[in-house]
Image (spheres, rainbow, N blue to C red):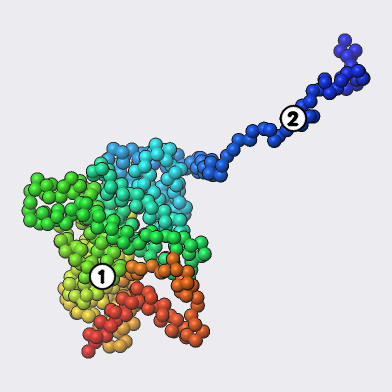
């Protein structure tokens, strides 16, 4: 029977059949055109959000499972205020996984790991603090990184200072010091980067013109002074020195100052202010800020070695610039002997390299001070200084005009990276174009370099220091 069936396409079409009626008018009459189909309307913002979500999902899938587990564990430790677990995660886990997976690239962005921590806003702020610190230390921050790291710092300090009452967060002392230290470091490198007008692209010039108070000296100083005031750290130090009871101290410092988080941040902000005023060239005010801080090895803050070393470095440098050479020598001798005694511990610290570099700079500053005010205070430090800077040591000790290049070399090696309080006038295109334009053809290269050095704060302080040295020459 199958053989008797005729294929449809072989059958003759009955001419009496109305094809138009039989087939219908789908697509024939124009009554059902594409224009009548309601297309879904997706605006640009929604489309961008969808693309970002897809990109975040792709990035999330690339995170190694051990890193996901580490972030979940880190978050739980912060939620529980478990200082022991936070310390291990911060000082060990973060550095271990950085070396293993992210030594040459960024950690996943906070938005990518947010699902792992239930979008916890406080933890994400802390995570971004670590994220941007990694970008600054291992990679090269772009202008977006510089602005976003400032915004994240503002979010963190606003949370700490402007919440209703003290926050319940607890963090290790080392992390709290690193937060203040990194905040000032990023401010310092931003000021240095911002001062180099000629290297800026058109886009960077436009962003800087609209930057406003981003990384301004005022905003940074305001944060540090606010933390000092909120914690009443000066009142706490004075009360301790006067032998007040714990109950009396608690009444003096109030609800914020009683909490270790605010007390530690207040103390570290004092040292941060010392550093900022040194960077801005106000050495008298820098020492005034820490007048209540006793420089000795019995302070509880010697536990945070990087803070202890930085304090002595900046205090000693202030003494040097104020021509208080014996005080500077005594300061450098105290801390350099401390570092030598603690060297075995430092080698286990993830900050060992930074502490060693600061120590080397202090040996150079000691050599300068010893040449200007010879002392036999400590032969061990003097001998180590001579071993490292023997040639310059000998030239400076002989004195005379030939010694000035040696003083200059060691000063530039050991001094802080000074910054200018006032940024270039990016909001004034005419003034910026004058700074960008090359020197006049009539200027010699020496004149051009001299004019650039005159604007550079480091060379300005160098010239003041060399003038002091020359004035002391016989």
Residue 311 falls left or right of residue 108: left
Q: Which one is nearer the viewer's eye here, 34 or 148?
A: 34
Q: Which residue is drawn at 19% across and 62% down?
A: 290
Residue 443: percent from left, percent from top: 47, 85
**x and y, in percent, of residue 372 in the image:** 22, 80
Could you tell me if residue 434 is visible in this image?
yes
> Which residue matches tag 2?
31
Question: Which residue corresponds to mark 1?
Answer: 282
Q: Is residue 50 above or below residue 470?
A: above
Helix, strand or loop under label 2:
loop
> How many other residues sit within 10 Å of disc 1, few (<14), some (14-19) or many (≥20)?
some
Quadrant where the N terminus sits is: top right
Q: Would you identify the image quadrant in which residue 196 lies?
A: bottom left
The residue at the point 28 percent across, 58 percent down is 222
Percent of width and height locating residue 234: 16, 57
Name which quarter of the figure residue 389 lies in: bottom left
Indicate the quadrant containing the C terminus: top left, top right, bottom left or bottom right.
bottom left
Residue at the far top: name it.
1
> Any mark on residue 390, and which?
none
């Amino acid at each position: 029977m199958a053989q008797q069936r005729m294929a449809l396409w072989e059958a003759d079409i009955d001419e009496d059949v109305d094809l138009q009626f039989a087939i219908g008018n789908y697509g024939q009459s124009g009554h059902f055109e594409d224009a009548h189909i309601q297309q879904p309307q997706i605006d640009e913002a929604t489309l961008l959000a969808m693309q970002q979500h897809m990109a975040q999902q792709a990035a999330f899938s690339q995170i190694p499972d051990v890193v996901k587990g580490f972030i979940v564990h880190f978050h739980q430790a912060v939620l529980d205020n478990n200082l022991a677990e936070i310390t291990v995660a911060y000082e060990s886990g973060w550095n271990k996984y950085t070396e293993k997976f992210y030594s040459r690239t960024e950690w996943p962005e906070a938005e990518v790991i947010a699902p792992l921590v239930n979008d916890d806003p406080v933890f994400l702020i802390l995570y971004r603090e670590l994220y941007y610190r990694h970008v600054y230390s291992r990679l090269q921050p772009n202008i977006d990184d510089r602005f976003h790291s400032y915004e994240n710092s503002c979010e963190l300090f606003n949370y700490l200072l402007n919440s209703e009452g003290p926050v319940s967060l607890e963090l290790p002392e080392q992390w709290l010091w690193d937060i203040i230290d990194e905040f000032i470091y990023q401010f310092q490198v931003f000021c240095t980067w911002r001062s180099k007008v000629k290297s800026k692209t058109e886009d960077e010039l436009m962003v800087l013109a609209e930057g406003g108070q981003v990384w301004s000296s005022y905003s940074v100083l305001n944060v540090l002074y606010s933390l000092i005031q909120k914690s009443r750290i000066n009142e706490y130090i004075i009360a301790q020195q006067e032998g007040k009871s714990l109950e009396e101290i608690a009444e003096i410092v109030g609800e914020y100052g009683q909490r270790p988080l605010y007390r530690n941040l207040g103390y570290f902000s004092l040292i941060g202010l010392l550093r900022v005023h040194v960077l801005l060239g106000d050495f008298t005010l820098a020492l005034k800020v820490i007048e209540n801080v006793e420089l000795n090895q019995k302070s509880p803050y010697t536990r945070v070695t990087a803070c202890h070393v930085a304090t002595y470095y900046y205090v000693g440098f202030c003494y040097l610039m104020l021509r208080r050479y014996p005080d500077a020598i005594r300061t450098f001798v105290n801390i350099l002997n401390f570092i030598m005694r603690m060297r075995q511990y430092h080698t286990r610290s993830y900050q060992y390299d930074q502490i060693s570099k600061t120590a080397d700079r202090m040996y150079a500053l000691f050599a300068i001070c010893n040449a200007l005010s010879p002392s036999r205070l400590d032969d061990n430090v003097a001998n180590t200084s001579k071993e490292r800077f023997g040639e310059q040591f000998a030239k400076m000790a002989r004195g005379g005009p030939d010694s000035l290049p040696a003083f200059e070399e060691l000063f530039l090696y050991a001094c802080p990276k000074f910054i200018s309080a006032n940024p270039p006038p990016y909001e004034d295109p005419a003034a910026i174009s004058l700074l960008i334009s090359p020197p006049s053809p009539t200027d010699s290269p020496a004149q051009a370099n001299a004019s650039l050095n005159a604007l550079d704060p480091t060379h300005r302080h160098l010239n003041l220091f060399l003038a002091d040295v020359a004035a002391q020459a016989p």
